Amino acid sequence: MRILQLFADKPVSRLAIMGCFAVLMVLPWLHLLPADSALHLSAYWVTLIGKIMCLAMVALALDLVWGYAGILSLGHGLYFALGGYAMGMYLMRQASGDSLPEFMRFLSWDKMPWFWAGTDNFAWAAILVVLVPAVVAFIFGFFAFRSKIKDVYFSIITQAMVFAASLLFFRNETGFGGNNGFTGFKTILGMDIAAPMTRTLLCFATAFVLMLAYLGLRYLMHKPYGRVLGAVRDGENRLQYLGYRTLWYKLSAWVLSAIIAGIAGALYVPQVGIINPSEMNPVNSIEMAVWVATGGRGTLIGAILGAGVVNAVKTYFTVAYPEAWLLILGGLFVVVTLFLPKGIIGLLDNITHGKKTVEPSVKNMETNIETNIEAKKES
């Protein structure tokens, strides 16, 4: 598949999506224009755009397991937070220099916990950003999928997992800053974290990584692996009857999803300036599912769009009408579920093409399976 075709199947959609990513990568650089310029983008807007793109990356990760594999996770906030904490440890070490981080001195600790070793090195911190969510996801996913826990029971367990993790991170003795978490960051890679150029580079990097994640998943979903995931969602028992080891397909998608969420968390922390256990609030993980449902699950671009729209609306209403936000969010989910089962992308597709968004379904499951059987024979 050609690179340009990875953006979308239809030429018009392809141009629109490419244009949106181009805009997202250009916008951060407007922050470097003089403050009196009409095109100048303030630090607030650069930070907000970067933050929403990080959240869009989490939605993308969730769409992989929910939209394609049919695994609804209500605990992806855990992997997002783990990646954020891994990056936060590096930023805290940079801020404290050769001494202990401030919260450790406040607790009268005389040395760092063993798991803080090497976190003053950016390369090791980057490895932890990927490794920690991957290991946690592998352990949890292996036992959950091997035990054949599915549907609402699986979703409930993921909620319990993220809630238990938040309680653990709230405790001061765990070495993660307790209720306050990590904050007071000063530098990243030797650059002042509050400098305009640093903000610009972080926001640009987020847009670039978001695009890479989208293209990578699009490529993967157009391969036999992606078609098998769709068939797993629609008829796992039938695939097992045909000899597919569905556990490993689900587990690999679960781990990949956790890694993407962890990277999103790592990009999120230096831009917002804080990471604490509130990021593991079960409500946050439920919101992530709302983003995907709003945009249109099983489309990838819908997850990004849904996260952008919902968080833009949230930014306004949490300031203008903070007491009404949760009611609005709940109402949005009800409306989408009842009237927009395919989300915004499905609505746009119906308007422009007069038909529903194409995705693996029960109707074409047999075609998916036959295609993958042939691919399996060829390999």
Image (tube, grey):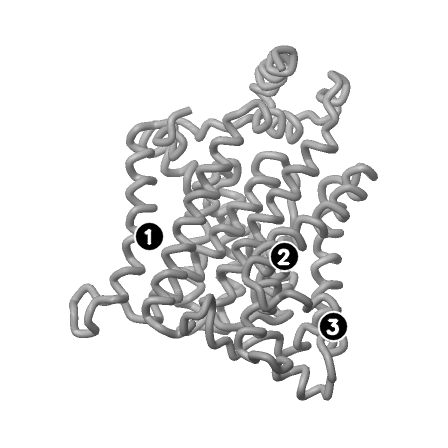
Residue wearing tag 1: 24
The CA span between labels 2 and 3 is 15 Å
Q: Which mark is residue 257?
A: none
How crowded is the residue under tag 2: few (<14 C-alpha within 10 Å), some, or many (20+)? many
Residue wearing tag 2: 128
The CA span between labels 2 and 1 is 27 Å
Which sits in the foreground, 349 or 173?
A: 173
At mark 2, the secondary structure is helix
**For residue 3, side relative to residue 182 (left or right):** left
How crowded is the residue under tag 3: few (<14 C-alpha within 10 Å), some, or many (20+)? few
At mark 1, the secondary structure is helix
Q: Are marks 1 and 3 in contact (CB under 8 Å)?
A: no
How crowded is the residue under tag 1: few (<14 C-alpha within 10 Å), some, or many (20+)? many
Q: Tell me which amino acid carries mark 1.
A: Leu
Residue wearing tag 3: 113
In the rendered view, tell whether residue 214 sits above or below residue 318: above
Residue 18 visible in rendering:
yes
Quarter in which the N terminus is drawn: top left
In the rendered view, tell whether residue 51 sits above or below residue 222: below
Where residue 287 sits in the image (x, y, percent)?
Answer: 56, 57
Which sits in the foreground, 343 or 241?
A: 241
